[in-house]
């Protein structure tokens, strides 16, 4: 158990051919998560390829104290330009200057307080996740590394990037790809049938004794 009371969880995160789990047959220390990959954020018109889509380079690294560091770098492809309202391209280069990921930071262990780093300005939006603002990244360049820490292992979640002009915003849904975020597991409510079965089991000894008396 780590200091937040969470049992060590083995999480396999399949994404774009990458499996977020260590190779089998290694020691516990060797099985610490240390994975990286890329995800595509589609533009407002649903384009998920070419110069109008953004690439997010991500990594998740687990420390020996069970702290996971999540990091993201947003790549603005060369040739990215502003689009007209009908989706046709202009000749004006496009920038990106904000990035966000969606998960509930108020869940115990989901977010290590004050660990959000990178960018010019950072914002913790609670149930809506984390947000970063950074100096404008022109086409052909990348953002600074944006990161935070969590006590929870990774699962796939949604991300978005923004600028004030089309084709912003770019997003994971509905046409892009998701990125690793802390895996928040919400237990399913106990069903009525399960409660009934438990009640019947508790009554069995009483019924047996009652039969012997009569």
Image: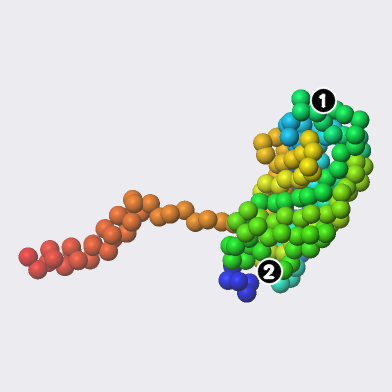
Vertical relation: 148 (above or below) 37? below
Give the CA distance from mark 1 to mark 2. 43 Å
Residue 88 image offset from top left, x and y in percent:
82, 25
Residue 71 image offset from top left, x and y in percent:
78, 57
Question: Mark 1 highlights which residue?
Answer: 88
Classify the position of the N terminus by image quarter.
Answer: bottom right
Quadrant of the rendered structure where residue 151 is? bottom right
Vertical relation: 209 (above or below) 143? below
**Disc number lying in front (1 or 2):** 1
Q: Residue placed at 67% from the left, 39% from the top?
A: 173
Question: Mark 2 highlights which residue?
Answer: 113
Quadrant of the rendered structure where residue 149 is? bottom right
Name which of mark 1 and mark 2 comes first in the sequence: 1
User: Outermost residue toward the left?
Assistant: 214
Front-lying residue, 14 or 55: 55
Q: Is residue 14 visible?
A: no
Name the colouring of the figure.
rainbow
Q: Residue placed at 74% from the left, 40% from the top?
A: 169
Q: Secondary structure at mark 1?
A: loop
Q: Is residue 181 visible?
A: yes
């Amino acid at each position: 158990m780590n200091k937040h009371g969470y049992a060590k969880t083995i999480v396999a995160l399949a994404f774009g051919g990458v499996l977020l789990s260590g190779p089998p047959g290694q020691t516990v220390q060797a099985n610490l998560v240390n994975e990286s990959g890329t995800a595509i954020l589609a533009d407002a018109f649903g384009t998920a390829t070419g110069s109008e889509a953004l690439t997010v380079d991500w990594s998740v690294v687990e420390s020996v104290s069970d702290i996971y560091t999540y990091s993201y770098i947003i790549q603005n492809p060369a040739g990215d330009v502003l689009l007209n309202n009908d989706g046709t391209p202009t000749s004006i280069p496009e920038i990106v200057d904000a990035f966000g990921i969606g998960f509930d930071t108020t869940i115990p262990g989901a977010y290590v307080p004050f660990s959000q780093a990178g960018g010019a300005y950072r914002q913790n939006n609670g149930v809506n996740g984390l947000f970063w603002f950074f100096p404008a990244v022109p086409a052909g360049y990348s953002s600074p590394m944006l990161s935070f820490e969590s006590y929870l292992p990774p699962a796939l979640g949604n991300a978005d990037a923004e600028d004030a002009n089309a084709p912003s915003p770019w997003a994971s849904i509905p046409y892009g790809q998701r990125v690793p975020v802390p895996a928040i597991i919400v237990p399913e409510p106990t069903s009525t049938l399960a409660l009934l079965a438990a009640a019947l089991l508790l009554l069995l000894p009483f019924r047996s004794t009652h039969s012997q008396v009569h």
